Amino acid sequence: MKAWLAALLLACASFGAWAHKPSDSYLTVKAQEQRVEIRWDLALRDLDYLLQLDRDGNGELTWGEVRQRADDITRYAVEHLAVTGNGKDCALKASAPLQLDHHSDGTYAVLSLAADCPNLQQGLKLRYSALFDVDPTHRGLVQWIAPGAATSQALVFSSTSAEQPLQLEAPSAWQTLKQYVEEGTWHIWIGFDHILFLLSLLLPAVLVRAAGQWEPAPSLKASLWEVLKVVTAFTLAHSITLSLAVLGVVSLPSRFVESTIAASVVVAALNNLRGTIDRRRWVMAFVFGLVHGFGFASVLADLGLPANALALALVGFNVGVELGQLAIVVVFVPIAFSLRRTKFYRVGVLTFGSLLVAAIAAWWFAQRAFDFQGPF
């Protein structure tokens, strides 16, 4: 028991960083005639990691500590962002003093940059390299406003797409759809809380409850039927609330949404220990899936939605989420079904695995609900 307790505590420490959404920064890039103006929001937690802004080491950043390093922050930004027009660099400079702004996941430094680009109309590119050397999953989420455009275009910069052209004409419907499908798939794969919730519901799908204990399911057909019910209910639920949130019909506080998502993982995992909800796990998937939809919506809002292609972006993102889920299910079900008769699966994976997941999710809940960071 002591060994398992130690393992649970170690897992909580290791997975603590997963309690918050992945590292992103936000840029609004606007071109007017021969000039490019940029607003860049960078998380203070990321800048502190890179530049050690917390001088007294008390774990809290003050405005004074940030302001004293404003030049260093600007220098880092300019060194990791480049605008080129017709193959020639456009020198970026600060156009206003450093400011702070609050996002759902903390405080961000706001940099205002500008560059003269006389060759703008002959081809414009943006190269982004911030944080990739310390966090390969980091992304730069860009809202690009072309000269004379009434709406923006959303671009995502990652370690594998660090340089992209800034189109002077609106993207095609296919380009918009493709981008948001990719983002939806990527989000479900890095959304560890969503994955653990889904897996917690799927773990018993290859088993049946008999005489107060879990027994192997009699057939693959029966297991697939359980999987289909759970995945369909989860998909339907989060699609409803994702659409309502994106369209502005319903809005919930970010802390409530993220805390409830963590709680849903705890409930789903602990249910596997006693099988209290056995044949109606799809109901749990639907109820909590409604809240998970609001979590997906916050990610989509961060990406930015093109006003002239809102429905297309929404559909693309949702399709991407479903493709990501399907990939997980396709890998999970054959393995789980082949192991369902073993003690390793019923005790090691289902029982102790569910305990481990519940412990991790409880840690997330404490962090999200009470803004508790703890010793890790």
Image: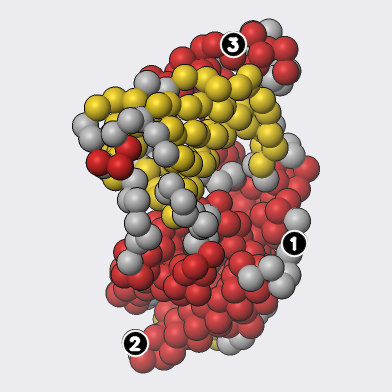
Tell me which colouring the rendered structure shows.
secondary structure
- The answer to which quarter of the image holds residue 289 is bottom right
Mark 2 → mark 1, Cα distance in angstroms: 40 Å
Query: Which residue corresponds to mark 1?
Result: 252
Q: Give the residue at mark 2.
A: 220
Element at label 3: loop
> At label 3, which amino acid type do we have?
Arg
Q: Are marks 3 and 1 in contact (CB under 8 Å)?
A: no
Tell me how far mark 3 sits from mark 2, CA to CA.
61 Å
* Numbered label attached to residue 69: 3
> Which residue sits furthest right?
370
Query: Which numbered disc, 3 or 1, marks the residue that appears first in the sequence?
Result: 3
Structural crowding at the residue carrying mark 1, measured as other residues with C-alpha within 10 Å and reported as few (<14), some (14–19) or many (≥20):
few
Q: Position of residue 114 (x, y in %)?
A: 48, 27
**How far from the left and from the top, in percent, is residue 10?**
54, 37
Precedes in sequence: disc 2 or disc 1: 2
Please give the name of the residue rendered at 68% of the width and 28% of the height, measured from the top-left corner: 100
Marks 3/1: CA–CA distance? 35 Å
The kind of residue tagged 1 is Leu
